[in-house]
Image: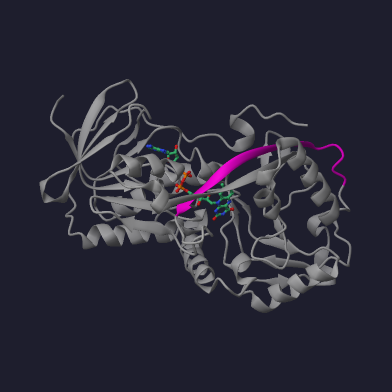
Amino acid sequence: MSAPAKSDVVIFGGGVAGLWTRAALAGRGYSVALLECASLGADQTLASQGIIHAGIKYALTGKAGRASRALADAAAIWRPCLAGRRDPDLSRVSVLAERMHLWTTARKRSKLAAWAASKAMRSGVRKLSASERGEALGGAPVNVDLYEVDEPVIDPAGLLTALLAAGTGPCAQITSEPEPTFKAMNGGSTLVSTTLMGEQRVEILAGRVLFCAGVGNESLLRAIGRDPVALAQRRPLHMVLVRDAPIELHGHCIQRSDVPRLTITTSRCGSERVWLVGGDLAERGVERDREAQIAAAKSELSEVLGWLDLSGCGFDAFRIDRAEGRTDDASRPDLPVILDLGGAIAVWPTKLALAPLAAARVVELVEASGLVPTPGTGLTGVVEPVVGARPWEGRAVSWS
Ligand SMILES: Cc1cc2nc3c(=O)[nH]c(=O)nc-3n(C[C@H](O)[C@H](O)[C@H](O)COP(=O)(O)OP(=O)(O)OC[C@H]3O[C@@H](n4cnc5c(N)ncnc54)[C@H](O)[C@@H]3O)c2cc1C
């Protein structure tokens, strides 16, 4: 094998965390090589609903002040980036909705949630007056309370494309087998050995290695001798897709919990609208098989959006895990989890919305380690990974 390539930082994983961090480090002059074993954003980022939460969902319980504050801080970074006034420039990313609707069912319990929401929510939440309701939510009846909240919904695929363009340095497709190996070297650097697409084994001498690989962090941690069970967790979801949806809807049906009863966002699949449905339905639905989950979704939708006709819609469901840093009680971390493990740093942003905070923290750690920016060498002629497909595009969707 020829002499090792060199890079200040080697990043494993090209989802939102890896690509945002790559752009942030490159902006500080560091040479960065990003290695991706599938397609960019393959697991969670492309399956995400693309909501740039402003902390509203978490403010509902009053318990999660830290999470709300972090989301508000992150939202303050997203806005200028989406406007092209701050790096990374995300001005070309499609904003599918400028704000989310929140709505209640007409039942008393849910009205309480609305009350809690109106009390606990931070700026940006507004109850829609009778004259503003118009066609919001396809003409919801008056006994349904309607709010709007300043949480944009973005197209995650466009986000990945923009972040890729915002960074510099080689972005290489690697194979998942054989797995990479890591050897600690004198002076704190790490010799990374991996296989490029095309079967060529390469070595890269890295000042720091970042694990931004979502569920893939587990095997990478194992490869450096760390126990993923002690450091990482997964929280499963059973998401629902609704094809040929009747309206463009971006909203949370709220209940008295930090998890909305349903969270619905809308994307396009050709000329059709597709709803991606999450929330409590997706969390509780992990116990159900596909048919039962679709039946539960139909029943929930008829309860909370009963005025819409969904009889012509197709339904599908898919399972996906949220990959996170471990918490003591396996609950959602409030913040991004970033573990400095010596030569390697493991990163879980916790939310797409929190990716800018995760990237900023990694930059702080790399700078504090005293790593001096130097040009990368040796990793050329690589096959670049492409942005992957959304859940209704990339797999054998079977609508029923
Ligand atoms: C259904 C769903 C809906 C969500 N909705 C929202 C939302 O609306 N708003 C929000 O803020 N958050 C949301 N989230 C959370 C958010 O999507 C994630 O926190 C975020 O996308 C995680 O990004 P990531 O880059 O860490 O991981 P991923 O997006 O999973 O990316 C990991 C990348 O690493 C690659 N990889 C894996 N193993 C390796 C390896 N060994 N070597 C190299 N590369 C590897 C993968 O192919 C992939 O490209 C949602 C999550 C889910 C599952």
Identified at 61% across, 40% down, the residue is 319
In terms of secondary structure, what is the magenta stretch mainly? strand
196 horizontally vs 392: left or right: left
Return the residue nearer the eye: 15 or 149.
15
Q: List x then y, in percent, for residue 86.
A: 41, 60
**The one of 225 and 302 positioned closer to us in this rendering:** 225
Q: Is residue 261 left or right of residue 309?
A: left
Residue 139 is drawn in which quadrant? bottom right
Magenta stretch bounds: 309-325
Q: Residue at x 17, y 59 (%)?
A: 370
From the viewer's side, name the closer residue of 127 and 235: 235
Quarter of the image containing the C terminus?
top right
Seen in the picture, residue 175 relative to 297 is either above or below; the reply is: above
Establish if 279 lies above or below 185: below
Q: Residue at x 61, y 49 (%)?
A: 49
Q: In which quadrant of the rendered view does residue 140 lie? A: bottom right
Position above or below: 209 against 271 = below
Q: Is residue 328 above or below residue 93?
A: below
Residue drawn where x is 60% and y is 29% of the image:
395
View extreme (top): residue: 198
The percent position of residue 326, horizontal first and vertical second, equals 44, 56
Residue 145 coordinates in the image, percent (x, y): 81, 68
Q: Quadrant of the N terminus?
A: top left
Q: Position of residue 225 (x, y in %)?
A: 28, 44
Instruction: Please say whether residue 36 is one of the residues in the magenta stretch.
Output: no
